[in-house]
Image: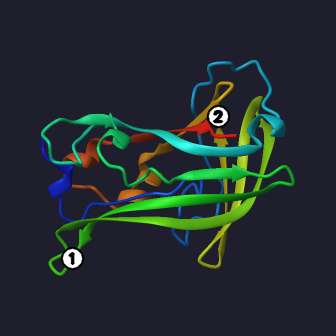
Amino acid sequence: MKNLFNLKGLCVFIGLALSLISCEAEDSEIMASNVSGTDATASITPADLEGEWILSKMNADTLVDLNNDNVGHKNILLETDCFDTMGVVFNPNGDMVTTNSKLDFKAGANNDEFKCLSGRTDTGTWRVENQNNEERLVLTMTINGNEYTHSRVLERTENTFAFEVSKMESEQYYGNPDGTDAEDVTILSLEYTRVN
């Protein structure tokens, strides 16, 4: 397996992913992604999500080896500590704050060094909606002066929620992976665990 750590031009920006996605300027429509719910009949209420959450899993649909130890994992968090500070706070008044990180594989003078960029925060609003008989988390955020709205069908348990990010959205995190083994990653699944 090719080592993603050594791939030139691979940029992984995993904003909460709840910034949920630091969007390209031309992305003005609501983007939706689905995750099969483990309890599809239960309604999600705002009270279910209010509070602080940390990123607990970031699963790719193929193995990755970011730490160059020749052992690949689907859970990217087992490959780097870059995302240890990622999380989101959903306030009862509908406001939210996310903390995000970015893996940059084009750092350094020759664009071939690895660098972790962490600590970026974004703010916005959140709400829970029923769309097409699906409970969704709808986020509206202002990033670099542009407003973006994202809608996610959630998989949730009492202490976790998860959603998927499609290949199109994933490319916003790590750039266009064509020509690398990362081009086989079509879905990232992000799971958050309740802190309080």
- Name the residue that disc number 1 marks: 108
Toward the viewer: 119 or 125?
119
Q: Quadrant location of residue 162?
A: top right
- Name the residue that disc number 2 marks: 154
Q: Nearer the viewer, mark 1 or mark 2?
A: 1
Q: Amino acid at mark 2?
A: Leu
Up/down of 173 relative to 65, above or below: below
SS under mark 1: loop
Q: Position of residue 93 (x, y in %)?
A: 87, 54
Residue at x 12%, y 39% (from the top left corner): 70
Q: Position of residue 105 (x, y in %)?
A: 25, 64
Number of marks in the rendered image = 2
Q: Amino acid at mark 1?
A: Gly
Q: Position of residue 175 (x, y in %)?
A: 34, 62
| Few, some or many residues within 10 Å of mark 1 (<14, 14–19, 20+) | few
Decide which of tag 1 and tag 2 comes sooner along the chain. 1
Residue at x 80%, y 41% (from the top left corner): 129
Toward the viewer: 128 or 83?
83
